[in-house]
């Protein structure tokens, strides 16, 4: 069963350096890292020490609050370092890979003959479970919850994103196996798969409800898809997982090996060879992509793990984030812009804008833009209205929700629909905001406050 | 431009904390960011950002005001010379107008920005650009011969009581420019009525220069005199004839704007040029403007059907081209801070704004400028409209919860 959902609000930002549809295999990295802060809401309890040797799938740490949730090493090797930040918070566990990879054998599991508990405990012990996230709050999922449904967005509509059909090419059997397992984990709502209307690569997948989405970003955001297929109400919990992790999950059950593989889209205007690269979760950036020492504009190159709209800034010797499937290289925008030539009084032909006050809206749709990281103005009070609404395709009033979060009015947040949103859904609002309000940060803080309040 | 940036960077240390001129940091900062959008970069969140900022937004509103400003300047001269029966060249008319308009603009910006700088320095934030627009709107809603000291008072009142006490730009409840005008009309009712709509009309009258029949009254002033009188009397018919084809306030003259009135409000064509700029750039809300227009026309039509006095019998199309209706619709009602902020709310807000503008104008002859009152009233009502729109959204969500 499938249906079509048209999303009208939103915008596609066409950045220069879109990755080609080819996949090259990255040389195996020397160092991998698992970063606990990638898994929101987790309190790290280490089970390894520096110098210990591990296999792919060996537990590195578990969640102190939910000890059944184990986090595994992506490769076999030796624990090189445990990086700590302020208050000795663990930021990363770095693993130096062995030349030969070896795996913990979790055994094969026949999904059709297994029940929910068997599948769940296999995912927990193997370290696959942390790739589930939950709504509300957009944090790591809790294995004790019985999610109403499980939602997968099979495409990423954000700029420079990996193409799911490229990433899942040749992995349909694993993907189907993963879906079958998810169907046993989900409650009455079942498994929902959101597909891009123009892409039929996953059309043959069974055992899930398919919805075809049409329209600009953020139509590929799983939150937007949930809103339009089975909206979330207070008290309900759904899980989300990325399509590549569904295939990895299927692979785990059929082979018994934990292989968190990643097809990563490498792109951006400073990327010499924009294409997809096959690697593992937590691989070092250097093993995936060549970062030039200087950008075209003479400044440094910013390395973003994830999408330019939502990702994390990492250093050249940093690591790919656990939930990231893209790396973007963009020039830093330290140049002050003179008012007439490129600043606020210019015609604005060189800058992609959601506002029609720049003439970019007259440009052909095929034009790609090389954007830098300049703020494009200073932070101001909320003045303009109607801007967020244009790129926020949910039946929620984004400005009023953000304002209720700013004043920490929990009652209003709940009423205005905070349970349905994640920071990423506000990324375009933040991009186009005249007053340069850090919307995603505000929403993240709001979600965290609310979660603490509810205990 | 590197040279200019070097100069600015070289004097910067004096204004930074510990420098000799640290008190004037706000002034320096606003001038620096005026010339160069700073090289600030994003940290996390969205790594790329739109080029749109508040400076550009506000500047485009000023551009949209230019046609009305230029026409208004010319019209001051035109009204003056026709009131004394002389013909004059374009340049002379512009000069007469410029001598009235430029001091008004200087006073408006001088007083308003002075107060803004003070509050920005006190609160320790940068200058918000909001006043750039308010400072231009204020001269345009003033009568020609308003004394400058009154304008200074009005601006100070509007900026301090209308805006800063609520927390500054983005926090005000009512429109700043209209607050200043309302202040003048209520604080100085005697000085703000009668012979101030045409430059020097009182002096011309005293000197016997005035052309016969010129009184210096506005279209609304004339129409207000018909209220309470029987329609078929000669006095009322005399007024109504001024609005017929060939009369002083014919549809043609009102569209063009060659009639007495506040400086920027007379020419519908100039205002609509501004409206096009605001709509094309997406800065002015088409929702508000459109529904405001419809609201005004509907009320005009209802009055037409009633036809109780001369004012009511005026064609709805004619109603909306006289007085400040068009100016209020394009530049006042659309102020995003004081208007409704939800999309549905904007439609309701605009419609009621236009509706009440015409209603107040006709029902309250003692005070004919209904648009100002209507927009101020709707400014106060806007949060309530939004409240109900949000409540409807909340109810939809709660209904869903009950259905599971």
Image (cartoon, coloured by chain):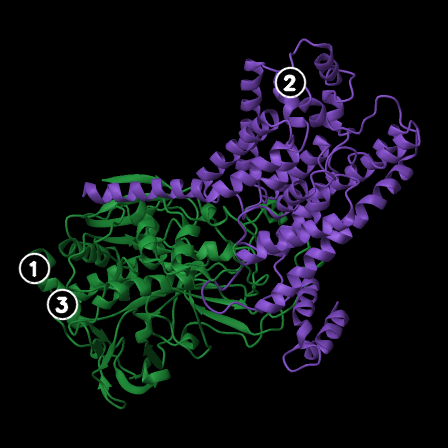
Mark 3 residue crowding within 10 angstroms, few (<14) / some (14–19) / many (20+): some
Q: Which residue is mark 2?
A: B314
Task: Let me know if marks 3 and 1 both belong to one chain.
Answer: yes
Expressed as whole percent of the image width and height from the top left, the position of residue B265 reads: 71, 35
- Circle 1 is placed at which residue position? A114
Residue on which disc 3 sits: A122
Q: Is residue A179 above or below residue A72?
A: above
Q: Which one is earlier in the sequence, the residue at label 3 or at label 1?
A: 1
Q: Are marks 3 and 1 in contact (CB under 8 Å)?
A: no
| Rendered shade, chain A | green
Give the Cα distance between marks 3 and 1. Answer: 11 Å
In the image, residue A403 sits, relative to residue B30, either above or below, namely: above
In the image, is A387 to the left or to the right of A203?
right
- C-alpha span from label 3 to label 2: 81 Å
* Vertical arrangement, residue A422 with respect to residue B313, above or below: below
Q: Mark 3 and mark 2 in contact? Answer it, CB < 8 Å.
A: no
Q: Chain of mark 3?
A: A
Q: Secondary structure at mark 2?
A: loop
């Amino acid at each position: 069963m499938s249906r079509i959902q048209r999303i009208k609000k939103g915008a596609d930002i066409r950045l220069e350096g879109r990755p080609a549809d080819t996949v090259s295999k990255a040389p195996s990295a020397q160092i991998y890292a698992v970063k606990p802060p990638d898994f929101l809401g987790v309190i790290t309890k280490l089970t390894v020490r520096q110098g210990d040797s591990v296999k792919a799938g060996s537990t590195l740490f578990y969640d102190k609050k939910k000890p059944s949730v184990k986090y595994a090493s992506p490769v076999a090797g030796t624990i090189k370092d445990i990086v700590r930040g302020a208050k000795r918070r663990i930021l990363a566990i770095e693993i130096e890979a062995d030349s030969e990879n070896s795996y913990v054998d979790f055994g094969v599991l026949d999904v059709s003959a297994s029940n929910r508990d068997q599948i769940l405990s296999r995912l927990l012990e193997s370290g696959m479970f942390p790739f589930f996230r939950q709504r509300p709050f957009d944090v790591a999922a809790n294995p004790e919850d019985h999610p109403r449904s499980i939602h997968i967005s099979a495409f990423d509509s954000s700029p420079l994103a990996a193409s799911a059909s490229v990433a899942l090419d040749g992995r349909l059997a694993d993907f189907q196996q993963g879906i079958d397992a998810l169907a046993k984990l989900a409650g009455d709502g079942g498994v929902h798969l959101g597909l891009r209307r123009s892409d039929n690569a996953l059309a043959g997948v069974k055992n899930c409800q398919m919805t075809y989405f049409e329209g600009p970003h953020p139509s590929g955001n799983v939150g937007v898809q949930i809103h339009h297929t089975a909206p979330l109400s207070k008290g309900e919990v759904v899980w989300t997982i990325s399509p590549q992790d569904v295939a990895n999950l299927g692979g785990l059950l059929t082979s018994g090996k934990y292989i968190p593989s990643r097809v990563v889209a490498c792109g951006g205007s400073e990327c010499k060879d924009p294409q997809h690269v096959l690697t593992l979760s937590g691989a070092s950036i250097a093993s995936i992509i060549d970062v030039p020492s200087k950008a075209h504009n003479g400044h440094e190159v910013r390395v973003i793990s994830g999408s330019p709209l939502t990702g994390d800034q990492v250093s050249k010797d940093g690591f790919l984030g656990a939930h990231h499937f893209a790396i973007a290289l963009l020039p830093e925008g330290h140049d002050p812009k003179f008012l007439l030539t490129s600043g606020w009084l210019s015609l604005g032909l060189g800058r992609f804008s959601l506002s029609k006050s720049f003439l970019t809206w007259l440009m052909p749709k095929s034009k790609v833009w090389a954007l830098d990281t300049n703020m494009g103005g200073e932070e101001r009070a909320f003045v303009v209205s109607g801007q967020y609404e244009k790129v926020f395709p949910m039946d929620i009033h984004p400005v009023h929700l953000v304002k209720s979060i700013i004043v920490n009015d929990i009652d209003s947040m709940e009423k205005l629909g905070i349970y349905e949103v994640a920071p990423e859904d506000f990324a375009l609002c933040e991009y186009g905001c005249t007053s340069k309000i850090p919307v995603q940060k505000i929403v993240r803080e709001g979600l965290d406050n609310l979660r603490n309040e509810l205990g | 431009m590197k040279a200019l940036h070097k100069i600015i960077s070289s004097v910067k240390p004096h204004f930074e904390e510990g420098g000799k001129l640290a008190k004037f940091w706000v002034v320096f900062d606003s001038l620096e960011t005026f010339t160069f959008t700073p090289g600030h970069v994003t940290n996390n969140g969205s790594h790329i950002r739109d080029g749109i900022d508040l400076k550009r937004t506000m500047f485009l509103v000023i551009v949209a005001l230019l046609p009305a400003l230029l026409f208004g300047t010319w019209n001051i001269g035109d009204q003056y010379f026709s009131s004394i029966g002389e013909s004059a060249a374009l340049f002379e008319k512009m000069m007469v107008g410029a001598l009235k308009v430029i001091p008004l603009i200087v006073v408006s910006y001088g007083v308003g920005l002075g107060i803004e700088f003070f509050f920005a320095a006190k609160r320790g934030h940068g200058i918000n650009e909001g006043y750039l627009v308010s400072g231009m709107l204020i001269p345009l809603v003033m009568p020609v011969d308003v004394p400058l000291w009154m304008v200074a008072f009005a601006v100070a009142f509007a900026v301090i009581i209308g805006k800063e006490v609520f927390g500054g730009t983005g926090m005000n409840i009512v429109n700043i420019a209209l607050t200043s005008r309302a202040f003048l009309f209520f604080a100085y009712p005697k000085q703000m009525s009668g012979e101030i709509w045409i430059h020097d009309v009182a002096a011309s009258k005293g000197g016997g220069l005035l052309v016969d029949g010129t009184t210096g009254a506005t279209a609304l002033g004339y129409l207000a005199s018909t209220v309470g009188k029987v329609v078929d009397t000669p006095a009322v018919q005399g007024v109504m004839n001024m609005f017929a084809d060939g009369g002083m306030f014919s549809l043609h003259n009102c569209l063009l704007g060659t009639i007495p009135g506040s400086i920027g409000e007379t020419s519908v064509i100039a205002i609509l040029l501004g409206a096009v700029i605001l709509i094309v750039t997406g800065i002015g809300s088409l929702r508000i403007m459109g529904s405001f227009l419809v609201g005004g026309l509907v009320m005009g039509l209802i009055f037409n059907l009633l036809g109780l006095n001369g004012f009511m019998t005026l064609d709805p199309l004619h109603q909306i081209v006289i007085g400040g209706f068009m100016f209020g619709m394009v530049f006042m009602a659309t102020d995003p801070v004081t208007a409704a902020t939800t999309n549905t709310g904007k439609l309701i807000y605009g419609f009621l704004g236009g509706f009440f503008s015409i209603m107040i104008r006709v029902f309250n002859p003692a005070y004919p400028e209904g648009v100002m009152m209507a927009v101020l009233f709707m400014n106060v009502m806007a949060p309530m409209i939004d409240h109900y729109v949000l409540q409807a959204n909340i109810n939809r969500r709660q209904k869903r919860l009950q259905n599971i």
